[in-house]
Image (spheres, rainbow, N blue to C red):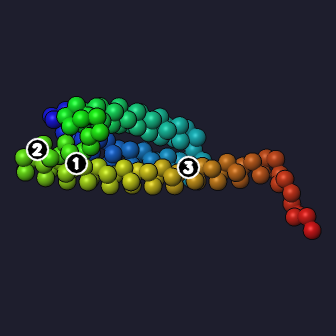
Amino acid sequence: MRALLAGIAADLQAYPQLEQALQQQFDAALRHKSADLAAAAEAITTLVDAMQQRRAERVALVQRLVGETGNMVQAFALLKSPAREKMEADWISLEAAVIECKRLSKRNGDLLAEQYTIMQRVLHGEEQIYAPA
C-alpha cells in the first residue's frame, strides 16, 4: 500500500512539470523554434515514460492487493478513514491533472498538424486550386 501511495504522490508532483513542458512545446511551436520544440519533446517523453512505468506498477500493486480485476476504489477501501480520504482526494487530483495534460497535448498536436499542413501547401502547392464544375 505504501508503494501505491508513493506512486500516486510521485505522479502528483510530475504532472505540473508535464503541464509546464506541454506549455513550452506550444510556445516553441507558435514561434517556430525547433531547438526549443525538441527540448520540450524530450522533457515530455522523459516525464511520460516515468509516469507510464508508475502506472504499470500501480496496476500490478492493485491487482496484488485486491485481485486480478481489482481497481483503485477497491484499493481505497482497504485503508482506514483518514488515509482513505487523502488517497481518494489525491486520486481525484491526479485524474484532473491527467485530463488537463491530455487537453494540452491535443491542443499542441492540433497546432503542429496545422503547421505541417500549411507548410506542405506552401512547398508543394494545392492539389486542386479550383473545384471541378
Q: Amino acid at mark 1?
A: Val
**Residue linked to disc 3:** 109
Q: Residue at x 22, y 48 (%)?
A: 73
Pick the residue in front: 103 or 119: 103
Q: Is residue 60 above or below residue 15?
A: above
**Residue found at the very far right of the displayed protein:** 133
Of labels 1 and 3, earlier in sequence is 1
Q: Position of residue 51 (x, y in %)?
A: 35, 37
Q: Amino acid at mark 3?
A: Gly
**Up-down relation of residue 10 to residue 113 (above or below):** above
Q: Which residue is mark 1?
A: 73
Q: Is residue 65 left or right of residue 39?
A: left
**In the rendered image, which residue does mark 2 sit on?**
79
| Residue 85 spot, x, y in % from top left | 13, 52
- What is the x, y in percent for residue 62? 24, 36
Residue 29 disc label? none
Q: Could you tell me how far apart the alpha carbons at marks 1 and 3 are, in whole angstroms? A: 33 Å
- Mark 1 or 3: the one toward you: 1
Q: Using the numbered discs, state the Cα–Cα distance from disc 2 to disc 3 in whole angstroms.
A: 40 Å
Helix, strand or loop at disc 1? helix
